[in-house]
Amino acid sequence: MDENSNPKTKYSVLEIGEVKYNTLFTKKYLNRKPYIPKNPKQIVSFIPGIIKKIYVKTGSKVKAGDKLLVLEAMKMNNDIIAQTSGKIQKINVKTGDHVPKNFVLVEIK
């Protein structure tokens, strides 16, 4: 802090490694959406589209890399694959459904 700074200004401490910095965060930074890591057990649509084919059923066992379903988006068929091994707990779509972006398609247990 220098001698020209306002004494009423509230600084936040930002720690990077072992070094601590006094800083001001912008309003835009403070209002940002917090980062939420993706759950590999929930398969979500990465783009809006139509479900063309479903390869699995509830209770099926899948391995990482197995095809789960086909999502048609922008005239292209996209194979949606399992990112982790497990058992299909719930299928939230059926053939012909229109799904928005980030919709949970399949849940793996």
Image (cartoon, helix red, strand yellow):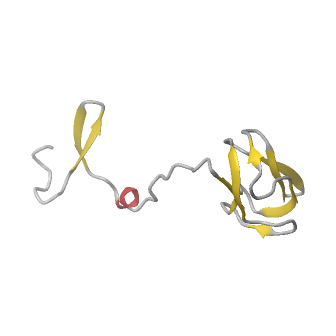
Instruction: Give coordinates of residue 39: x percent, y percent.
Output: 57, 50
Q: Quadrant of the N terminus?
A: top left
Pick the front one: 50 or 63: 63
Apparent side of residue 76 relative to residue 86 in the rendered image (left or right)? right
**Residue sitting at the far top:** 18
Apparent side of residue 25 relative to residue 48 in the rendered image (left or right)? left
Residue 93 occupies quadrant: bottom right
Apparent side of residue 74 relative to residue 101 in the rendered image (left or right)? right
Pick the front one: 95 or 34: 95
Instruction: Give coordinates of residue 40: x percent, y percent.
Output: 61, 47
Is the residue 41 above or below the residue 15 in the image? below
- Which residue occupies 63% across, 51% down? 109
Instruction: Give coordinates of residue 61: x percent, y percent.
Output: 75, 46
Apparent side of residue 37 relative to residue 70 in the rendered image (left or right)? left
**Residue sitting at the far bottom:** 97
- Which residue occupies 86% across, 65% down? 95
- Which residue occupies 12% across, 60% down? 8
Please tell me how many numbered marks the rendered image carries.
Answer: 0
Instruction: Give coordinates of residue 27: x percent, y percent.
Output: 35, 61
- Which residue occupies 80% across, 62% down? 49
Is the residue 106 above or below the residue 82 in the image? below
Pick the front one: 10 or 38: 38
